[in-house]
Image (cartoon, rainbow, N blue to C red):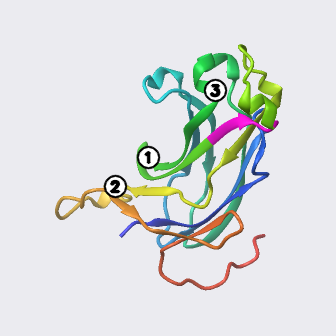
Amino acid sequence: MSAVNITNVAVLDNPASFLTPLQFEISYESVTPLKDDLEWKLIYVGSAEDETYDQLLESVLVGPVNVGNYRFLLQADPPDPSKIREEDIIGVTVLLLTCSYLGQEFVRVGYYVNNDYEDEQLREEPPSKVLIDKVQRNILSDKPRVTKFPINFHPESSGSGEPSPSQDQPVENNGDGEQRFDTPACPPEEPGP
């Protein structure tokens, strides 16, 4: 069992202009205290064929991590369109939210993103050069793909056996852009200091 479980991710300001900053409200629980911070990353996949076009939009350290429930707002600048091939701007791509501990990724939440012109005429007759200020980004927040990776959260007490293989986790959508992740019931969040 993981020491940290994502309990909810809300994609805010969605859909939005391609050039609008991204915002995710992330809730998670820690079932054991951790000595080091968690590293959360937001990655925009610029091309399905070539990962050199991927852009790290944000990387933040969150801690200290004691037993309890946590929530924070992850904000990131939008992807830099000059670092994306012109033919890859319009269409479907992926946004990855990852969390790591001691350099080991233990959970990845993937979202499909549809970038298209908001104006119907531009969709039907796209200009030869992308008009980035007219492109709308729609993060398909109702069907994230959650993958967990087994890691050792307490290497100083390394012990028995091999971790189990990675596994996808079913996600439940409540219809308002938030997802409830299948985790055991936990008490309500305590107000922070």
Q: Which mark is residue 89?
A: 3
Task: Examine the image and state in which quarter residue 115 appears.
Answer: top right
What is the quadrant of residue 93 in the picture? top right
Q: Position of residue 20 (x, y in %)?
A: 80, 38
Q: Nearer the viewer, mark 1 or mark 2?
A: 2
Q: Amino acid at mark 3?
A: Ile
First in sequence: mark 1 vs mark 2: 1
Of badges 1 and 3, the one in the foreground is: 3
Q: Position of residue 158 (x, y in %)?
A: 26, 58
Identified by mark 1, the residue type is Leu
Q: Residue at x 73, y 20 (%)?
A: 130
Count residues near mark 2 (Cα–Cα under 10 Å), then give few for <14, some for 14-19, many for 20+: many
Instruction: Identify whether 142 is placed above or below 110.
Output: below
Please indicate, yes or no, whether residue 59 appears anywhere in the rendered image: no
Q: Distance between the Cα atoms at labels 3 and 2? A: 35 Å
Tell whether 32 sits left or right of 112: left
Does residue 26 belong to the magenta stretch?
Answer: no
Question: Residue, x 72% and y 34% (percent of image)?
Answer: 78
**Mark 3 / mark 2, whichever is N-terminal:** 3
Q: Foreground residue, 24 or 111?
A: 111
Q: What secondary structure is the magenta-colored segment mainly?
A: strand
Residue 48, relative to residue 95: is it above or below? above
- Per the image, the residue denoted by label 2 is 151
Question: Are circles 1 and 2 on residues that touch, CB within 8 Å?
Answer: yes
Q: Residue sitting at 48 percent across and 20 percent down?
A: 52
What is the x, y in percent for residue 9? 63, 61
Which quadrant is the C terminus positioned in?
bottom right
The residue type indicated by label 2 comes to Ile
Q: CA distance from mark 1 to mark 3?
A: 34 Å
